[in-house]
Image (cartoon, helix red, strand yellow):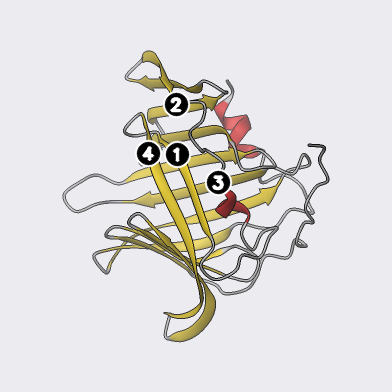
């Protein structure tokens, strides 16, 4: 698998929206920076690219790049997470692909490669409807998305739930910004009207948009599919 090519897929077309810049805070302290990008694919699926450069207290700076791809319904297709040092040398890469049985995980680290299959009960929900909230669909307050999500770091499936809690506002750089609050399982996202994040909080980590200018790509319509 050519990982560099996979990461490049989201950035090359003139009609694509541009990535948004992020600042990273840990316990309220500036700790890094990065970017976020998503687009709806020609088949109706969704691709997400996140690129972060940061240093946790007492640790060396690292760069973590991740890609997540979902099909048009919201089923996971693949997840990749690559960790590099400050000179761009790869420290580790984790790649998972998904089928009806579960996840096939490959980990490459220190010149060694290991593989692992992690099954998920076929009846267990894995469709992440919330990935398309405000991107393609407008949820109602109280709407929920319950699903099993594969954790690349822990190499296991975890039951998750996202809840749309309604319109909200948040302060960014001293300015009050309106958005939509989506919460669940230790995470919080404030999204704009097109589904791009204004704030993402995961535990002690907070990612904030540095510019409130909206990406320019048009909102996609839902694809027509046979049942």
Q: Mark 1–mark 4 contact, CB under 8 Å? A: yes
**Vertical position of residue 2 compared to residue 87: above or below:** above
Label 1, residues with CA under 10 Å away: few <14, some 14-19, many ≥20? some
Marks 1 and 4, how far apart in space? 5 Å
From the viewer's perspective, tell me whether residue 130 is left or right of residue 185: right
**Vertical position of residue 23 compared to residue 35: above or below:** below
Identify the residue shown where x is 49% and y is 79%: 168
Q: Foreground: 171 or 20?
A: 171
On-image quarter of the C terminus: top right
Marks 3 and 4, how far apart in space? 13 Å
On-image quarter of the N terminus: top right
Residue 141: where, in percent of width, then height? 54, 71
Identify the residue shown where x is 78% and y is 42%: 42
Q: Is mark 2 on a helix, strand or loop?
A: loop
State the residue position of label 4.
158
- Marking on residue 148: 1
Q: Which of marks 2 and 4 is nearer the N terminus?
A: 2
State the residue position of label 3.
128
Q: Earlier in the sequence, mark 3 or mark 4?
A: 3
- Marking on residue 171: none
State the residue position of label 2.
120
Q: Which of marks 1 and 4 is nearer the N terminus?
A: 1
Q: Which of marks 2 and 1 is nearer the N terminus?
A: 2
């Amino acid at each position: 698998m050519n990982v560099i090519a996979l990461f490049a897929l989201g950035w090359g077309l003139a009609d694509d929206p541009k990535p948004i810049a992020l600042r990273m805070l840990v316990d309220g302290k500036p700790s890094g920076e990065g970017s976020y990008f998503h687009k709806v694919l020609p088949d109706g699926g969704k691709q997400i690219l996140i690129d972060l450069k940061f240093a946790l207290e007492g640790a060396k700076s690292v760069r973590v790049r991740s890609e997540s791809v979902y099909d048009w319904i919201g089923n996971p297709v693949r997840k990749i997470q690559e960790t590099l040092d400050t000179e761009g040398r790869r420290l580790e890469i984790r790649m998972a692909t998904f089928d009806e049985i579960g996840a096939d995980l490959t980990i490459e680290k220190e010149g060694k490669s290991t593989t692992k299959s992690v099954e998920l009960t076929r009846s267990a929900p894995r469709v992440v409807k919330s990935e398309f909230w405000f991107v393609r669909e407008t949820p109602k307050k109280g709407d929920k998305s319950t699903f099993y999500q594969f954790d690349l770091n822990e190499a296991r499936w975890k039951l998750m739930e996202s809840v749309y809690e309604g319109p909200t506002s948040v302060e960014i750089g001293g300015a009050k910004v309106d958005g939509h609050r989506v919460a669940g399982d230790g995470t919080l996202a404030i999204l704009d009207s097109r589904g791009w994040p204004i704030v993402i909080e995961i535990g002690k980590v907070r990612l904030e948009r540095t510019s409130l200018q909206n990406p320019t790509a048009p909102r996609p319509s839902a694809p027509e599919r046979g049942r």
